[in-house]
């Protein structure tokens, strides 16, 4: 109802979806006083399941939250001039794990492929930047494409976060750091 005859594979930003909902409410004269919206049969059908109680009016805020819950989230990964890559669900996190093996501390970096980053390039850059030994190792498990992790000798979690943010443009909230080495 909000998207007309849009193909099922077309994706919309959340702002566009809320704007379309607002336009629908305006076009059908469903806006009431004090931020309330009168629900017509189309809105009731779209926003509520058959087993839920369907009220005649609801606040605009609650309607917006219900719209968000009903939609399927997709994430777009954009790297450089390439076309965006869409995946279902929340954006993945790059994992940086610092652990101790014997008497040595190592830093492991996983999930670089989800952002279109080449593990070998990150390993080479890490070797130059941090003046340390680096290795690329395939992760165990079955997947459509082989996933790798970058092993860096030493504790470089803060430096890698800074490198990924400044050089690769990855926001810090998409990077998780786990320290398993010694008491920090």
Image (cartoon, rainbow, N blue to C red):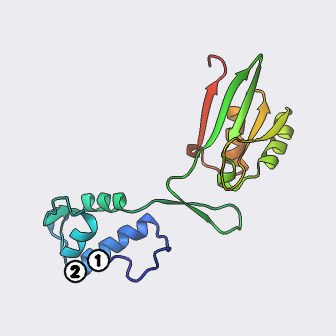
Callout 2 crowding tier (Cα within 10 Å): few <14, some 14–19, many ≥20: few
Quarter of image, res 151: top right
In this orientation, does residue 120 appear?
A: yes
Residues marked 2 and 1 touching at CB (< 8 Å): yes
Residue 101, image x, y percentages = 74, 21
Secondary-structure class at tag 1 = helix
Q: Is residue 9 left or right of residue 94?
A: left
CA gap, disc 2 and disc 1: 6 Å
Q: Is residue 47 left or right of residue 9?
A: left
Callout 1 crowding tier (Cα within 10 Å): few <14, some 14–19, many ≥20: some
Q: Is residue 81 left or right of residue 126?
A: left
Residue 13, image x, y percentages = 46, 67
Q: Which residue is mark 2?
A: 28
For image coordinates 21% across by 69% down, the residue present is 44
Q: Nearer the viewer, residue 49 or 37?
A: 49
Image height of 105 relative to 144, above or below: above
Q: Nearer the viewer, residue 143 or 36?
A: 143
Q: Which residue is mark 1?
A: 24
Image height of 11 relative to 120, above or below: below
Residue 108, image x, y percentages = 71, 35
Residue 97, image x, y percentages = 66, 32
Q: If the image is split into quadrants, where does the N terminus sit?
A: bottom left
Residue at the far front in the pictured view:
142
Q: How many marks?
A: 2
For image coordinates 77% across by 16% down, the residue present is 103
Q: If the image is split into quadrants, where does the C terminus sit?
A: top right
Quarter of image, res 145: bottom right
For image coordinates 26% across by 62% down, the residue present is 63
Image height of 175 relative to 9, above or below: above
């Amino acid at each position: 109802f909000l998207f007309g005859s849009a193909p099922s594979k077309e994706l919309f930003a959340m702002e566009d979806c809320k704007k379309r909902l607002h336009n629908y409410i305006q076009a059908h004269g469903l806006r009431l006083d004090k931020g309330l919206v009168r629900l017509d049969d189309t809105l009731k059908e779209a926003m509520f399941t058959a087993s839920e109680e369907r009220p005649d009016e609801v606040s605009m805020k609650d309607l917006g939250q219900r719209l968000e819950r009903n939609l399927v989230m997709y994430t777009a990964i954009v790297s450089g001039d390439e076309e965006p890559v869409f995946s279902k669900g929340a954006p993945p996190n790059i994992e940086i794990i610092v652990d101790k093996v014997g008497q040595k501390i190592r830093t492991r970096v996983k999930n670089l492929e989800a952002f279109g980053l080449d593990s070998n390039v990150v390993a080479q850059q890490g070797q130059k930047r941090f003046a340390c030994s680096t290795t690329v190792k395939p992760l165990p498990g079955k997947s459509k494409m082989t996933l790798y992790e970058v092993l860096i000798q030493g504790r470089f979690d803060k430096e890698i976060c800074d490198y990924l943010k400044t050089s690769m443009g990855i926001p810090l909230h998409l990077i998780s750091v786990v320290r398993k080495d010694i008491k920090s």
